Structures are given as C-alpha cells and as structure tokens.
Amino acid sequence: MAGGAAPGGSTASDTYARARHWLLMPSWAVLGVFVLAPVCVMVIYSFLTKEFRGGVIWDPTLAAYDQFFFDRGLFGDSDPKLQWTYITIFWRSIWQAGLATILSLLIGFPTAYYIATRPAKTRALWVFLITIPYWVNLLIRTVSMKFLLRDEGPLNDFLLNIGLITEPLQIINTNLAVQLGLFYSYLPFMVLPIYAAVERYNFSMSEAAADLYATKWTTLRRIVLPAVRPGVIAGCILVFVPSLGAFLAPDLLGGAKNFMIGSLIEEQFKGNAGNWPFGAAASMILLSMVLILLMIFAHQQRRAEASA
Amino acid sequence: MNSSAELAVDVRNAVKRYGDFTALQQISLGIRDNEFFTLLGPSGCGKTTLLRMIAGFEDVTEGGIFLFGDEIENLPPHKRPVNTVFQNYALFPHMSVLENVGFGLEMKGSSRKEAAKRAGEMLELVQLSQFAGRKPAQLSGGQQQRVALARALAPSPKVLLLDEPLSALDLKLRKAMQIELKHIQRETGITFIFVTHDQEEALTMSDRIAVMSAGELQQLGDARAIYEKPRNMFVADFIGDTNLLEVSVDKVTNGRAECRISGNHALSCDAVDGVDVGARVHLSIRPERLLLSDQGIEGSSLKGTVAENIYIGTDITTIMDVDGGPKITVRTSNTERGNKRIFEPGSRAYVNMETGAARLLVD
Ligand SMILES: Nc1ncnc2c1ncn2[C@@H]1O[C@H](COP(=O)(O)OP(=O)(O)OP(=O)(O)O)[C@@H](O)[C@H]1O
Ligand SMILES: [Mg+2]
C-alpha cells in the first residue's frame, strides 16, 4: 500500500479563489443576518433575568440554566436536586426524533430508489407527487391528521366498521400519534436527497457486481449503499434535526403528556406564562446537543473513510 | 444437441429489439470452447448489445442463447459463469484497486485473504501491483481499464466477455496488452469473446472473427478468410484497404467470370455463386496485390496515368487514373524498391493484378 498516496488535491488558481470569495458573499450575508445574529441574541438572552409577561431584564445571571437542571423547591431555598422534568422531555424528544428518522429511512429509501429507477420521463412526475402534500401548510396538515386519528375519526370508524376492533383505538394524545406526525411531516426530506443520490448512481456498477456473482442484496449492501451514503446521511440529518425541535406535531397530536423540546421552548415565548431566558437557555442546550451529535457523527464518518 | 455441447456459447437466431428499433436481427453464432473469438464492426452495430445478452443484462427478444449446451434465458447474471470487462470499466469507486479485483472471488466464497492474494497476482499480470491501494479515481483511464481486465479475469470464468478492453491504451501499451491477452487466453483456456472496432487488432488476435454491421452478421471466419475472401462489399471495405470497382459481367465459363469496368477495360476473375451474365456487381482488389509495370497482361491489366505517389514509410502508395475509368490505389512495399520501378506522376503505366487478387462481391 506504499503507493497509496493520493495525487495532490485540486488547488484552484488564485483567480478562481478570489472569484469564489466574492460569489459567496451574499450567502455569508444571509447566514450572518438570519442565523448568526439570532443565535447571538439567544446566547445573550439565556444569561439574562426574566421579566414577568415576557421580555428580559439586563441583569446577567445563570438562573435559566439553573432552573433547567436543578430543582430547588417551591421557594428556591431547598437543597438543589437534579431536575428530571426537562431532562425527560429532552430524552423523549431525542428518542422520538431518532425513531422518526429510522422510520423515514425505512420507508424513504425504497421510495427514493423506486423513483430514481423509473424511466426519466416518469421520475419528475413521481417527485412532483411526493411534494404535493407539502403545498399545504404544515399546521393544516397536522390538524387534519388530528381529525383522522381521533377516537370518532375516519380511521377508527373504518376499523370499527370492518370489525377489526370493537372499541375505538386511542391513538391521539399518544407517542404513536406524535411519531406519525413527525414521520409524515419530514418524510420528503428523507426521500429527496436519497433520490438525488440514487439518480446520480451509475447502475453499470450494479451490473458489474452481478457479473461478479453478487446477489441483489449483496449488491445493495456493498455497492449501492456506500455510493449513495452522502444522500442517506443528508436525509437523516434533515429529518432528525427538525424533528427534534418540532412543536406542532407534539402539541396537536401528543397532548400535554407527550411534550417535546420544541413545545417547551415555544411555550416560553408565547403569552404571559413565558420565560424568555429559560426558553433561550433550552434552545442553547438543544443547539449544543445537535452540534455535538453532528460532530460525533462527522468524526466517525471520517474515521470510517480513513480505514476503508 | 451433441454439436452444441462443444460450443461455449451458442447464439441461435437471436433478435433484440428496443421498442420498434431492431438492434440485432437473427444472429446465429457458435463460439467454441477455448476460442479467441472477436466481434468486429463499426460503432452502433450491436456488439455491446450482444455481449450484454450473453452476460444476462438484456433479455433476448427472440431466439435463444446456450452456454455449454444449456439454455440460459432464465439464469440471472450473477449465476452465469461469465465475466465481463465493461466498455466503461464500471469499477467500484469506494473500493481500492485490490478490493475491486478481489470482489468476484469473495462473492464466489473465497475468504478475504485468499481473494486478496489472488487479486495481487492478477494485478501483477496487468502490471499494476504498485497501485493496489489506490482508489479507481486516482488512476489514469488506461490503468482503470487494466484493473477492469484483472477484475474480470480473477474469478477464472468459463467465458470472458471483453468490450473494447484496450481502447484507452496508447499504441505501445496496447500492443503489449494484445500479446499479454493472447497469452493469458492460451494459458488459461478461457473462451474469450472480444469486442473491437479496430480491424487490425481483430486480425492479429483472433481465432475467428464475426464481422457485424447494423445488427446483422456479415461474415464469420478466421482472419485469412475475412481478409482474402470477403463475402460482401461491407466486409471488403471494412477490413483493410481495398479498391472497389463497379463491373458488369460479360461471360461466365468454367468458374471464371469475364468482367468489364468503365473505360472498356476487361478483367477476368474467379466467379462466385449468384453472379450471372449482365449483372452489375463489384470487384474488390487489395492495393498490395497490384503491380505497376510497362507491360500489360491480357485480362489482368488496366492502363492509366500515375496521379500521385504517397510515401508512408513501409510502403509507397500510388494513385492511378485508369483511362476512362476510376482511380485505383496500388501499394508497393518499400523494401523491394530495388527491383521495382517507381513511376513518376504523369507517366503512363499498366496496373497488373496478381492471380486470384480480384474478388467478386454480389452485394
Ligand atoms: N437501451 C437502448 N434503447 C434503445 N436503443 C439502444 C439501447 N441500447 C443500445 N441501443 C441501440 O442499439 C444499437 C447497438 O448498440 P451497441 O451499444 O450494441 O453498439 P456497439 O456496437 O457496441 O457500438 P460501439 O462500438 O460504439 O460501442 C445502437 O444503434 C444503439 O443506439
Ligand atoms: Mg459498444
């Protein structure tokens, strides 16, 4: 393997580097104004004192983070205990988002693969069909889902009518309903990147594998999946991250018992019960968690690539 | 059934249609075991399509394909004891060169270690040992092509399909690989079905050649038969250089045909089936089988004026304006110049045919 050194990576000439620099300016500007600045505001708010009826007082404190992690009793004077309420909510959120990601992958991959292997003319139609539901606002879709799933809703009616069940199924206000909501909300974010990757995939490699005695299953595992992995990873991130912070599906379908981080944060900025610093702190904790997860993931990717 | 059992691949009346486009029409070919068999034809004539049908990537629209006597219609590609060197290589980009070459062996049940060992040997054979650890993207086109060759050879298939496996190599490496391939084929006894559109490559390497054009088999035979006894205009024109003269047949006697070309020159040659008096057919004469001379021979000469001499190293090509007739190309070997006269442009000369040099073509 001595000769394994890669020939030097492409070093673009100075002219191109400068041009690229300028071309990237608008993107940097948008990112700065709409991503970086709000995040900075959140960081600052999370260290300020809350004002009743929303808003903040410019008085630096760690109270918001303290409230997240510790329980100091009703009057704030008992010995601090670990506060499980919010950690439980976080844990449930990760679990739900992870499950939604796996579910979308299991359904999304075959769907994407199927679409990408249709003749070129029909592919566009399939992609179009996938996106149609998303022309309707997420709120409206989630509310309709609530109607579909409730005890007297069409789903239970149907199951009762065909005699599969005798009592309406309790779906609404369960984790299952939240799961269905998340899965439904973000499925296209799984399908589309995988579709793009499979479409770019050169199927003569599958033929070469079959020619070399690989079964369909082995070909999928050893040849197709490694080739489309970037699409799969993109899809997983695009489903996992928004699921983690989602609040519509847990609010409308999960009820009070199945609270997720998104709802918790949303509550803090809404109405009179709000606590902006606490909401900002919860957001920061969520953000750090996502970043740490992504970093662990990227690190492992790099290790896997290096060892291959 | 007996005769077909000796055939490695037996293509019987195979037809391939894409919609209403017919890519292959009624192809019948018997490829013998241990044979170096070449499919030769211009771009788009259906060579790749035929290989893909044998490998199992395309259905046969009509007819059948037999592998060592067995119909393989329902055998999926991964169960056919056939390996392919793909025209576009189709190497696995995420695997190293060594893993690529070892893949087929692994799939056949060898351990990783065994596969790697044999893959290493194959890489040595194609002179790429020092690149074993690289990814295909880090190789040149010619190197990738040799990896594809090693990968297809490694599992020792019964039949190896090679789709223009040398097309990306420079002339010198190409010649070396031709010899190497021929050597491998003899050594291993694997039946090679070799696709090329390079006629010289086909002539030098093959036991037998199938010349194809527009989805049809034009002629099947060894190099000599294809070159010296082309069956039709297409084969005569496609293989090597030739003079194609339009002639009318005056008389057919004792297997000889008396022909006439424009300018009222008479030529006689061997008759072939399907040539009748009055027919307007073509005569093919290879340039190297013509001689320039001061004296004509009755029935084998054309008189004309030298238009041009072109020096091409090993040979000198002379273009003759035949009186009242077509232009004719004559090739004189450069080594024999000492005992042959060079006619300067503008001088008058006879073009004499060697006996048996002219071949009548019915279509
Ligand atoms: N999937 C397809 N659908 C329609 N027509 C096709 C298809 N594949 C091949 N053809 C047509 O069939 C004919 C034969 O193609 P093929 O690839 O076998 O040519 P070839 O002899 O290998 O040419 P080349 O030397 O350029 O590789 C061509 O006219 C091609 O356009
Ligand atoms: Mg081809």
Image (tube, grey):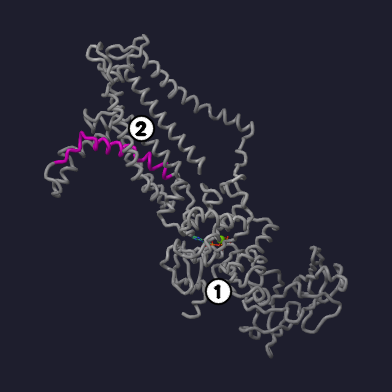
Badge 1 and badge 2 both on one subunit: no
Q: Which residue is identified by label 1? A: B32
How far from the left and from the top, in percent, is residue B346? 86, 68
B134 to the left or right of B298: left
Q: Is B353 situated above or below A157?
A: below
Q: Is A81 situated above or below A119?
A: above
Magenta segment, principal secondary structure?
helix
Element at label 2? helix
Q: Chain of mark 1?
A: B
Residue at image coords 28%, 16%: A80
**In the figure, residue A33 lies in which quadrant?**
top left
Q: Which residues are magenta?
A: A168-195
Q: Which residue type carries mark 1?
A: Arg
Q: Are marks 1 and 2 in contact (CB under 8 Å)?
A: no
Judging depth in this view, the residue of B354 and A258 nearest the camera is A258
Tell me: is circle 2 under 8 Å from ligand 1: no
How far from the left and from the top, in percent, is residue B194? 58, 65
Q: Which mark is residue A242?
A: 2
Residue at image coords 33%, 22%: A282
Q: Is B60 situated above or below A236?
A: below
Q: Residues within 10 Å of mark 2 (few under 14, many from 20)?
A: some
Q: Which residue type carries mark 2?
A: Pro
Residue at image coords 84%, 71%: B336
